[in-house]
Each structure stands twice: as structure tokens, then as C-alpha cells.
Amino acid sequence: MPMKPRDIISSAIFYTGLVGATLLLVHLGTKYGIEKVPQDFTRMQPRLERGGHLFVNKRARDPETLDYGDIIMYRRPLWKRASYEYEFARVVGKPGDVVELTGSKLYRSERREGKLEAKQPVSESYLNPRDRPGDFSPLIVPRNTVLVLFDSRDHREPLRDFLVPARAIHGRVVR
Amino acid sequence: MLRLPFRLTPRSAIEFSTGALLALVGLIFLLGTRDEYRAGRAFDQAMDSYAAAVLEDVHDGLDDAMHAKPSYDAPQEAVAKLLVDDGKPAEAAQMYERLRRRQEAAGGKASLPVLIGLAVANLEAVRVGQPSPEALREALREARSRLEAALAAHPGAGDAHVNLAAVALLEDDLARCRAELGKVMVVGNISPDALSILYNLNGLAALREQRYEAAAAEFEKVKEFRADWETPKLNLAAAHARMLIAPRANPQVALRAAMSLRRVLPDIRKSKSPLYSLICQALGTYSLLIHSQQPQATEALRYFAEAEKLGRLPWQSRFNQAIGQYLDVRAARRRNVAAYATPAAELARALVYPKASLRDRVVASCLLGTIEGERGNRKEAVAHFERAAALAAEAADPAARSAAVRVALSLIALYYEAGELPRVIRLLDQAAEIAGPEEKKKLDALSKQLRAAPVISRFECKQEKLFTDCDLRVSATVLTPGSPTPLTAENVALTLIEEASGTSKPLPFQLNGSAVYAVAVNAPQGKYRAKLVLSDPLGNRTEATSEPVELDRDPPQISKRVPDAGATVASFNAIQFTVEDRLSDVDLASLRVMLRYPAGSPLASRTLVSGGKVQYASADGSIPRYSDVTTNVRAPIPNDRLLKGEYRVLVHAQDTRGKGRDIEWSFQLAP
């Protein structure tokens, strides 16, 4: 039976709406949801193996909502020349904290409700004990920024590479 | 075609209309936020480019952001900040002022970046004009009040504290600067841009507090945040330069600082920073004196010459340059004493320069003393060193104590050469009181040498046939280790002592180097000893006495003769006498006694003693025949008929050394 014009219009509206809704969901999912991303970055071994895939919670971008020890995915700083676009590193300092690395040991004074707590050593079971990172003296973490460090600390990079502004954070690694 | 259970009915038409209306509202909402999204995205990209120091992209991004949303303040604040960085603070101040008015008109209060930017831009606008000190102070006061107002409007803003610390540092208020930097750590709220300024200020404050290592660490940290920023590099170089010339700097740290400075020196030269001269002076000074094991005068002079190209050196560097020139002359293979004139003139100025430290004066006096010593002007050299000693005694620091010991050693050398040994001893004692362990070892060694007693060796007195049989030869080897001058006859006294009589008399001697030689020609009989007394100018004295030498010139003597010579006796039955030798024993085995009878006697003579044995027994039997004689000789005569007349006794006696004599005497028998 031939379709009536009314049916044609209604079907077109339905399919258009369905496709639009699907595209919107995909867009929102990739922008704000969990995404599976390839990993070609190697400084987080063995926690993150090269060539694997990760699920990243892209809603977790606010430095204040991240937790110590979280691994985040962030946009590689422009001044670093590398083949990869994203880097992964572990959060060791949140805005206002004072962090220092002395004798390969990480110390952190956390800021809670605006007050700086006493300096405490940070337990880092994920480190390779053979690594000898270059120390740095107490560093205050600026606002809207997190201080990150790679699990592999066999060589030292400038401190500015480890201060990740909120705008560069893509999300927290879920798995 | 796939048919779906959807038909346009009055109900679905209402639902569709509602959906379309909502979609329209959504579309309007999306379109309404599109510009904001674009502006935010462009601004983020601009900030990323700013962090990466890609300034062209920064301007492009900010332009895009402002174009997308003209009312968006953040890009305009960033543009104003870039204007300050570009050296256009006046324009920046106008821009900030416009933003402040707009924000206050819109929301009541201006944003923190605008308030801080306004204070900074206004201050910089005054500073670029090279204002008078009063104008600068006024500008700083205004900046401080603006920043305090910003802090009041936005409590807990770390950026405001950072800028207040910077203002305090410009006002030379180090305590306030430190207080503000401390508040930054307390509030913790700081922007990433202010982080590098915070650590740069920390470094500058440490630099003013003369904590150069801490300052260098802070500047190194700043470099990690802002690789493109020249200021921390220059500040780091300044910290390293001061580290080099700081007293009591750690040698390893200073060495690292020197290496770092040598590495960055070409870049600083290209930048035409006034710091270049300071670094050259510091490297020159370091090459010379401070921690180099071996001063490298040539390198030091090269650095000083480089600094001199940029203008007249300050006094301290001219002084150090003079030290370099002095060392350069000293190091030359063919030392040209005339070349000391230039450094000597500058060093002499240090003695009267009011800003010269005590240490500088000590060094200048020491070097001038050495120069005068090399020129052969001993008197002037001593005067310089004595001044150095007096100055070093005034100083309280350990370096001056060490210098005092060195000065004392120099003076000791000068006095020693001049033979002024009491002064040498006094100085040695004084220096030993203040010397460290190593210096004490040197002083002890010198003192030991100076106080060492003169040495007499191979001292002997022997009888020797030189001119006569009875000559005495005296010889010795003498040494005065503590004496700076060669041994003279005044240092030696030689006497010959005759033991038996106890008399002594000086013995003339010859001194040939360290050999003493004397001869006593044809000395009388006696038992002699030679005594040698050796003294040096320091008063050290040694004496030695030789082994005794017996000079036996006489054969045995005969005494107590019975019958005596010329006597007239009525009878006799033995010849008696005593034979003795003063120094040796009588060789009794060689004693021979003969009695010659008067003319007309049946026998001409009788041998009474031969080979030390009596030949006849005595009449009373007390002396058996062939018994040994003693020194009290009693030689019985045989039972012969003794006629009246003259009897003669012939005695041959000799001592154990072989000296003999024949003695003869006569007596009359008249019964």
C-alpha cells in the first residue's frame, strides 16, 4: 500500500530525531563521558602498559575534585616536542599544597580548608626503587593546577612540565 | 519503506510542536553560548601558547577571544599584562583602568588581576622614566596602597602578597618582603604566572641576606618555570658571582658556581648586561685567591681586563687585579723586578684607602714586604711585614690568625738572614701561640733547628810526630745547625789541660769550614786533655773533652841512693836505690846494676842485678839469689874482700815505653 504523505513526513521526523539523538549522545559521551583511548605514552609503566587502551572519565577535570594518586590524562604542553598528544601522570599535589622531593622521597603539606597541614612523607608503592629522580625544593601548587609526577622517575624534567593547568586536563584514568 | 507506528494526529501534532519549541529554545541557547565557548577556547589556546612562549599565537588567540566576545575581560587583562611585559606600562595602565571602571560599573568591584595589574603598570610607568629617588619612593608607596586595597577586596590572594613582597624589596624593606612571602605560603592561593615571580623574589631576598646557595637554588627553580626569562639567569649568575667571592664559601659549591658562570658568560656578554663586569671581576678574584689551589694569575688578569673594558673597576677589583699582576710577575720564568712597580703602587694605595678592610691591608702589607724583599730592600720589607703583623693581631677572624702566622714566618726569615736571632726566637714563640696544628708543625721544626745544640764530632787529641817527638795534634769536626751565619773562630774555644798540675792554657787552632785543627809543638811531659767549647749566635753551647794523652818524655829516675853519690862509708853490703818513672812504669826486667871496684882489687867489677834479678843472696838471707827486684832496689854484693878506695855504681834503667838511661855515681870506702 502506498505511503500517505502524512506517514512519510512522520517517518522522516522520527528518523531525523533518532539520528540526531544518537549523534548527541555520542558527542556528549566523548566530550564529557568515559572514552576508550589508545595509550602510546610510556612513563607510567608498569601501571600503564604501552599500547593498551584506557578508560578515561572526562568529567573529572576539576583539580579540586581529583584525588592524590589519581592518574590523569592531560594535553601535552606545547613546548614539549613528542609524537604523542596526551600524557598520563599521577597527581601528587593539589592547588595550595606544598610539595618537595628530597632524597628521592616525596613530602607533601596538604591544604585543608585553606590551612596548610604539617609536612608528611608520601608513600609511593608504585615507584621503581632503582630510579634516582632529581630533587626539588618546596614548591607551592598554584590555583587551578595540579602537580603531577610520572611513576618512572629515572630522569628529571623541568618543574613546569609537571604543573598541569585545569584547562589541559582531559580526565581521570578509570582503568 | 519501513512504516513506523507514528501518525500525525492532533496529539502527536501537539507533542511535535512542543518538541520543536524546546528544540528551538535549545538552539537559541546553543547559539547564544557559541561565542562564549569560542572566546573561552581561544583564550585557553592563547594561555597555552603563553606558557610555551609562542607570543605570536598568544596575540592571535587573545584577538580571537576578544573578537568572539568583546565583553570577555580575561583576554583584555592578558593583553594589558603583555603590554607591561613589552615595556609599555603606560598603555597597560590605561587599559587596566578602563577594565576597572567597566567591571566596577557592571559588578561592583574590579577583578584581582585588574587591580594588581593597575598597581604594577603604574609603578612600571614611573620606573621606566628613571625617576628621582623621591619620585620612586612615592610611586612605590602608591603601588603598595593599591595592592593593599586589592588584597582588601580579594582576601587571601597570594598574587597580591607576591607583588607586595616585590614592592617591599624595591623599598629595601627585607623584613616586610620576607613577611609577605611567608603569607603567600599561608594563603596558598597563587596563579601559575606568579609562581616564578615568587621564587625569584625568594632568591633575591636570600641574595640580600647573603645566603647565596639558597638564592641560587631559588633562581634555578625559576628557570624551570620560565626557561625564556632572562632575569632568573642573570640573578643566578649574580648569586654565583657573590658565592665565589664570599668569605668561608664551600670550595665545592664555589667551584660549581665558577663552572656555571664560565658557561653562561658568553650569553651574558651578548646581553650587554652590567652584570657581565661583576661576573668577570668575581671570576678574576676566584681565579686568584679564594678557593683555587693554585692561583691562575693570567686567567684572573684576563677577566679583570675584560671587566675593565666596561668601565673603571671598583677599588676592590683593582686591588685584586694588583694581586694578580704581582703573582703574574712572580710566576714569570725570568722575573723582572721592575714589573712590580704597577701592582706595588696599587697595593700601597690599599694601606691608606679608607674602605680597605683590615684583611686587605694585611694582604697588601705582606705583598709589599715580599716585593721589597725581592728588590733587596730588607729594611722596607721588614717594616711592611711588621705592619702586617700588627694589623693581623688586631683582626678577630680565623683567616687573620693564619695570616699572622705567615707574616711571622716571613719576618722570622728576614731576621734570621740578618742574624737577629733573639728576635727570631721571640717571634717563633709568639707565632706558636696562635698557630694551627699544621703551622705548628712547621714552627716546631724551625724552632727545633734553631735551638739545636752545636755538634762536636770526631774530637781527638793525639801525640804525633810532626815537628818533634812530643807534639800533640788536636782535631774535631764542629757544626752549628741553628746558626744562620758560617762558623767563626769566635764560636770556638780550645784549651789544653795538663792534669797533673791542673793548669790549662788556650790552644791556638785553625778553623777550616767545619774542621778545627790545632797542634801543640814539643809539649812538656804531662798528661793532657783538650777541651773544646762550641757556641752559636743563639747562645746554644756544647763542650767536649778529649781522651787523656800522656806525653812521657823522661826515662826513669833514681833516688834514695845508699851509699849516696860522693859519700864515704866504712862498710857496705848492698847497693840500694829507688827507681821510678813519673808517667810510666819502670821496666824492671831490663834493670841492670854493676859495681866497679877500685883499682888494685882482684876483680874489676861485679854485676849485682841483671835481667831484673839480683845475682847474689844477701848475707842475712833475706834476699835470695835470683829473686826479682822491686822499684826499691836492694842489690846485695858478694862476699868479696873490699879494698879501700872509690867504688862506682852503674845503673841502667828504662821504663816500659823503652826510654832508658844510664846513671853512674861513686862513693868512697874508708874502713
Image (cartoon, coloured by chain):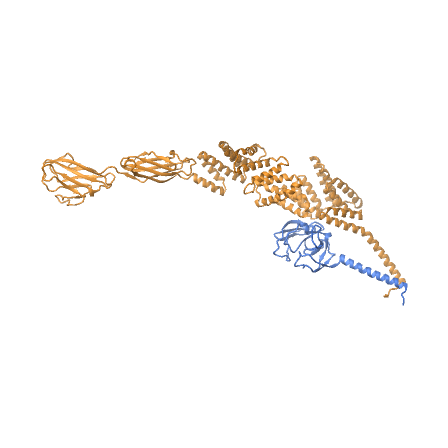
Looking at the figure, which quarter contains the C terminus of chain B? top left
Total label count?
A: 0
Q: Quadrant of residue B173?
A: top right
B441 displayed left or right of B548 = right
Colour chain A is painted in = blue
Is B24 situated left or right of B546 in this image? right
Which residue ends up furthest to the front in the rendered image? Answer: B334
- In this rendering, position of residue B119 left or right of residue B570: right
Pinpoint residue B613: horizontal percent, then vertical percent.
17, 44
Residue B248 visible to the viewer: yes
Residue B630 x, y percent position in the rendering: 19, 42
Q: Which chain is orange?
A: B
Question: Can you give x and y, in whole percent of width and height, for residue B235 in the image?
Answer: 65, 43
Nearer the observer, B170 or B8: B8
Mark yes or no: residue B210 visible.
Answer: no
Vertically, is B396 above or below B65? above
Which quarter of the figure is the N terminus of chain B placed in? bottom right
**Rendered image quadrant of residue B452:** top left
